[in-house]
Image (tube, rainbow, N blue to C red):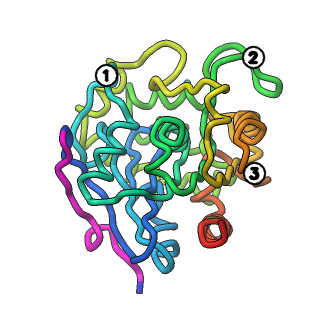
Amino acid sequence: MTLTQHEIAQTVQTKDWKLRYYEAGEGHPVVLLHGSGPGATGWSNYSDNIEALSRHFHVYAVDLPGWGDSDPADFATLDHVDAAIQFLDAVGIDQAAFVGNSMGGQTAIRLATTHPDRISHLVTMGAPMSRGQSMFAPNDGPSEGIKILVQTYRDASAANMRRLVEIMVYDKGRFATDELCQARSDAANTRPDHLTNFVTGLPDGAPIPIWTKLDSLAKIAVPTLIIHGRDDRVVPFENSLRLLTSVPDSRMVLMNRCGHWAQIEHAPEFNRLVTDFLKNN
């Protein structure tokens, strides 16, 4: 059986937000948090993972405030961690494993440092870590990928979306198809309020206020799996090396021929890695 977006879509009202999410499976709850790109949603980031993970776990892929079919958000004041905690409370989850790509990974990291009783496992893919000098990437400001991401928020045309998708992945021929780029452009432009709010609330130096102090990472006590693409041009993989050296109970998988979307480019392996990690830690 193949799950479809329509059949597993749900909506919940939290204290402050009406949130769209996608739910499937039974067992230990696993919350999937998407990245920050224009047109990103719980479904677009995890459509290749939800069904596989739902064979073992109770999966929730959330559209965070300001994305997808969830409420618009003011990015100058939005607290992503608080939104995630509100979601747990609204659907009646005491504790869940959190799996996050990019911005979603950073949100899950911060949640692990501030609400340790609400998280059982931490899985990150391409999560940005902290400001500071880089060993492997240029030190001239935001990465090449972040610059294109912001440009695409300002003009989410199919042409700009192609530039964004091409920098997100290693295998451009396979993933940066005309159909995908047009679909993500269409999805982004159906919510111009999300696009405008993102650009208007954009702080200096990062797409959102996501930085974590490195000294707080040692407090993370949950089992942590860190996944990163060797060819990531959005968030250099040294960010995950910092995370690995800081979190006591952590392990890292560095994937060659992989960009910023490990869960998309290497979906079968990603699904196996996450399932094994969650079941055996």
Q: Nearer the viewer, residue 39 or 217?
A: 217
Locate residue 178, reporting x and y percent: 48, 54
Image location of residue 146, percent across then percent down:
56, 28
Q: Residue at 39% of width from left, 76% of height from top?
A: 25
Which one is in front, 260 or 180? 260
- From the top left corner, tell me how far across and down residue 55 is, in percent: 48, 80
At horizontal 32% and vertical 40% (from top left) the residue drawn is 83
The question of residue 9 being in magenta is answered with yes
Q: In screen coordinates, is 194 left or right of 46?
A: left
- Residue 10 x/y as whole percent: 23, 63
Q: Is residue 42 visible?
A: yes
Is 6 magenta? The answer is yes
Marks 2 and 3, how far apart at CA: 22 Å
Q: Residue at x 36, y 73 (%)?
A: 24
Residue to which mark 2 is pinned = 133
Density class for disc 2 (Cα within 10 Å; few <14, some 14-19, many ≥20) is: few
Which residue is more in the foreground, 223 or 117? 117
Q: Give the residue type at disc 3.
A: Met
Label 1: which residue? 77
Q: Is residue 272 above or below residue 76?
A: below
Residue indicated by mark 3: 252
Badge 1: residue crowd in 10 Å (few <14, some 14–19, many ≥20): few
> Relative to 226, does residue 146 appear above or below in the rendering?
above
**Tag 2's secondary structure?**
loop
The residue lying at 26 percent from left, 65 percent from top is 9
State whether residue 255 is above or below residue 194.
Answer: below
Q: CA distance from mark 1 to mark 3?
A: 32 Å
Mark found first going from the N terminus, 2 or 1: 1
User: Magenta region: which residues?
Assistant: 2-15
